[in-house]
């Protein structure tokens, strides 16, 4: 039996990068896949086509998870369309890098809205259906930067550190209802975003990692499979680092 056989998963920011890899990996493990996208319409539509071509029941929703009302509508739509919700993965996120002395208020606020508030919005919206069925796995995506900080990313680091504190609190509040909440904290993951960087810079990063390579989106997706599956039913409130040993 596949690890996620028959489970309904919702992935925010699922049309590209890590989110897309999670969608494909979950589908391969037997899950039905719902995901959100916002600006990447073409990529969202192609992902639905790819998943359906594999015989997977999948649907993309153009939705802004940083908007409270939109998140409420999103969860209601997923439950209506799929019948229930078993797994919620908050993967949507952006960067607006700048040194703190040059960082604008809007660069701070935008990061907090999209990276951190979106987690509050979707988890709050999912409370009722998850508590009604007394089961569920919530996975919130943090970062190695949220654990150790990084120059030029005070806003991003704060948002990702906030996700950890938020998730630990959710785990405490919902554990008695059979609902688990964990965090995945990726390190240097090679995606289409990093493909445009100077190869010498990327190699320097790889050399600093004990496993001597950058991670793949599938490495993160596999960690999510474990935390979403019944193999981790006694694990909640934890941070699973996927970083090749970069931070221990």
Image (cartoon, grey):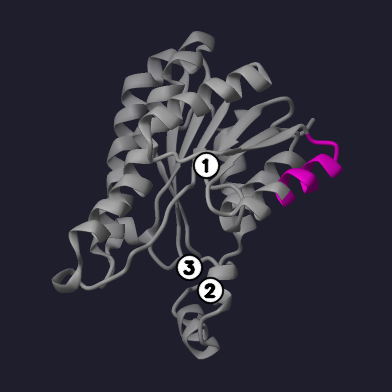
Report the front residue among 3 and 38: 38
Seen at 47% across and 74% down, the residue is 209
- Residue behind mark 3: 188
Q: Position of residue 156 (x, y in %)?
A: 31, 58
Image quadrant where one finds the C terminus: bottom left
N-terminal-most mark, 1 or 2: 1
> How many residues crowd around disc 3 within 10 Å: few (fewer than 14), some, or many (20 or more)?
many
Q: Tell me where residue 142 appears, x and y as whole percent.
A: 40, 50
User: For the residue labelled by badge 1, is the local secondary structure a helix, a strand or a loop?
Assistant: loop
Magenta region, residue range: 46-56
| Separation of residues labelled 1 and 3 (CA atoms) | 20 Å
Left/right placement of residue 134 relative to residue 41 reads left
* Residue 141 visible in the shown view: yes
- Of marks 1 and 3, the one in the foreground: 1
Residue 93 lies in the magenta-colored region: no
Task: Give 126 or 109, whichever is nearer the viewer.
Answer: 109
Q: Residues within 10 Å of mark 2 (few under 14, many from 20)?
A: few
Residue under label 2, please give it.
Answer: 194
CB atoms at circles 3 and 2 under 8 Å apart? Answer: yes
Q: Residues within 10 Å of mark 1 (few under 14, many from 20)?
A: many
Name the residue beneath numbered marker 1.
Answer: 12
Front disc: 3 or 2: 2
Picture residue at 59% right of the left edge, 54% below the top: 40
């Amino acid at each position: 039996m596949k690890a996620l056989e028959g489970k309904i998963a919702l992935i925010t920011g699922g049309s590209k990068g890590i989110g897309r890899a999670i969608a494909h990996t979950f589908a391969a493990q037997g899950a039905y896949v719902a995901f959100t996208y916002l600006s990447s319409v073409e990529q969202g539509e192609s992902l639905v086509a790819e998943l359906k071509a594999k015989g997977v029941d999948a649907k993309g929703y153009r939705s802004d998870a940083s908007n409270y009302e939109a998140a409420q509508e999103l969860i209601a739509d997923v439950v209506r369309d799929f019948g229930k919700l078993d797994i919620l993965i908050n993967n949507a996120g952006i960067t607006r890098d700048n040194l703190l002395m040059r960082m604008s208020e809007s660069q701070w606020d935008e990061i907090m809205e999209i990276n951190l508030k979106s987690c509050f919005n979707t988890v709050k919206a999912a409370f009722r259906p998850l508590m009604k069925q007394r089961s569920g796995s919530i996975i919130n995506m943090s970062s190695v930067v949220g654990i150790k900080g990084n120059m030029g990313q005070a806003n991003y680091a704060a948002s990702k550190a906030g996700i950890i504190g938020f998730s630990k609190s959710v785990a405490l509040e919902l554990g008695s209802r059979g609902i688990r909440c964990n965090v995945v904290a990726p390190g240097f993951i090679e995606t289409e975003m990093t493909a445009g960087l100077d190869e010498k810079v990327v190699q320097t990063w790889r050399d600093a990692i004990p496993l001597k390579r950058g991670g793949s989106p599938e490495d993160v997706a596999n960690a999510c499979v474990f935390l979403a599956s019944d193999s981790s039913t006694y694990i909640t409130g934890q941070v699973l680092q996927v970083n090749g040993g970069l931070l221990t």
